[in-house]
Image (spheres, grey):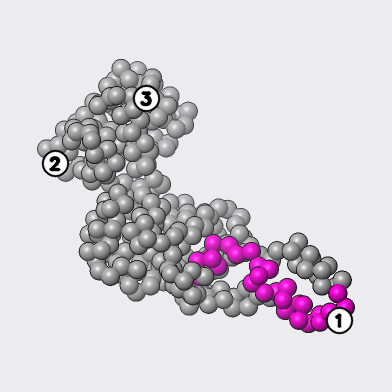
């Protein structure tokens, strides 16, 4: 997938994803050694985006399995298309001399099976990126379903048989730590802790998306992000939300956030009623802006953010 570590570094940066040397090295080793990559950290810290950045850098496709409570094998692996099977039986029975054994074999072949993301990921000629997102939302029984795939790169499906991988995908598992991921999956994976970026790194990320803006603007957005995340909000902003906010500010023709802009900007910053009320407290938004300016100044000086 990547000929060298330098290709990983350049490829990720070209997609707009700024990663440190630990992350790029781990991605490179996971790709070379065909090991899953487990990413843990707070929501909005860039875990999912890393999977898409790897796919873009490798010029391949993402197969995404979005996990949720109650997900089952059919959603993950796939299921037989029963209406199509019935149609086939109806058509076959209209002709004379039906070979029922051959028909049964045909009905349980892949042409009658609607593949889910796990199975599709094994069927690419060129390796894809298989993103198993928010794995912490499922139970241990569903985790066990993944062990065969991540150990021997195949899936055993009742009535269909064992499907081996045509190519081995680059697997990214993400967790927001709502539940501890089990040890069997951890043993099979490389592990990366993904936190929100430092203000300096976030300024660099904003700069890639708004290259025509000033260094002060980039630092201002990073400072605002750090201030918001330090306010114990119910929904602190993700990296992608800060990028959206920066672009919105450019559309408004503003180069910096001021306390007087509170009512205009509040719908972009507060994503729950509790957070909105917190920022509406007397001097609340002004205090936030002040904190953001301090972090921004430190970032411009090259201080530790």
- Provide residue 27's location: percent of width, then percent of height: 32, 64
Circle nearer the viewer, 1 or 2: 1
10 Å neighbourhood of mark 2: few (<14), some, or many (≥20)?
Answer: few
> Residue at the location (15% across, 37% down)?
300
Relative to 290, does residue 2 appear above or below in the rendering?
below
**Side of 242 where 183 appears, left or right:** right
Find disc 2 in the rendering and name its residue. Answer: 303
Can the viewer see residue 186 in this picture?
Answer: no
The image shows residue 127 at horizontal and vertical percentages of: 42, 68
Quarter holding residue 24: bottom left
Task: Tell me where residue 238 sits by quadrant.
Answer: top left
Mark in front: 3 vs 2: 3
Please give the residue where the numbered disc 3 appears in the rendered image.
265
- Dot 3 or dot 2: first in sequence order is 3
Q: Do the residues bearing badges 3 and 2 touch, measured as CB atoms within 8 Å?
A: no
- Under circle 2, the secondary element is loop
Residue 186, percent across and down? 41, 67
Residue at x 59%, y 75% (from the top left corner)? 156
Give the residue at mark 1.
97
Q: Is 111 part of what is drawn in magenta?
A: yes
Above or below, 29 against 83 in this view is below
First in sequence: mark 1 vs mark 3: 1
């Amino acid at each position: 997938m990547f000929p060298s570590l330098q290709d990983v570094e350049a490829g990720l940066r070209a997609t707009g994803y700024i990663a440190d040397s630990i992350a790029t090295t781990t991605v490179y080793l996971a790709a070379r050694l065909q090991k899953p990559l487990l990413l843990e950290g707070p929501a909005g810290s860039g875990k999912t985006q890393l999977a898409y950045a790897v796919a873009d850098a490798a010029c391949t496709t993402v197969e995404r399995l979005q996990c949720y409570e109650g997900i089952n094998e059919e959603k993950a692996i796939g299921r037989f298309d029963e209406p199509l099977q019935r149609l086939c039986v109806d058509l076959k029975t209209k002709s004379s001399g039906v070979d029922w054994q051959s028909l049964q074999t045909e009905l349980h072949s892949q042409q009658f099976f609607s593949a889910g993301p796990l199975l599709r990921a094994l069927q690419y000629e060129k390796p894809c990126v298989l993103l198993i997102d928010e794995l912490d939302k499922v139970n241990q029984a569903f985790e066990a379903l993944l062990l065969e795939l991540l150990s021997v790169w195949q899936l055993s499906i009742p009535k269909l048989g064992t499907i081996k991988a045509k190519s081995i995908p680059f697997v990214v598992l993400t967790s927001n730590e709502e539940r501890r991921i089990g040890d069997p999956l951890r043993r099979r994976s490389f592990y990366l802790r993904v936190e929100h970026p430092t203000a300096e790194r976030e300024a660099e990320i904003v700069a890639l998306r708004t290259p025509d803006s000033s260094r002060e603007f980039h630092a201002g957005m990073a400072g605002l992000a750090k201030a918001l995340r330090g306010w114990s909000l119910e929904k602190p902003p993700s990296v992608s939300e800060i990028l959206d906010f920066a672009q919105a500010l450019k559309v408004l023709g503003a180069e910096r956030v001021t306390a007087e802009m509170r009512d205009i900007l509040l719908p972009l910053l507060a994503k729950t009623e509790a957070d909105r009320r917190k920022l509406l407290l007397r001097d609340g938004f002004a205090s936030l802006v002040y904190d953001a300016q301090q972090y921004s100044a430190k970032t411009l000086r090259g201080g530790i953010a």
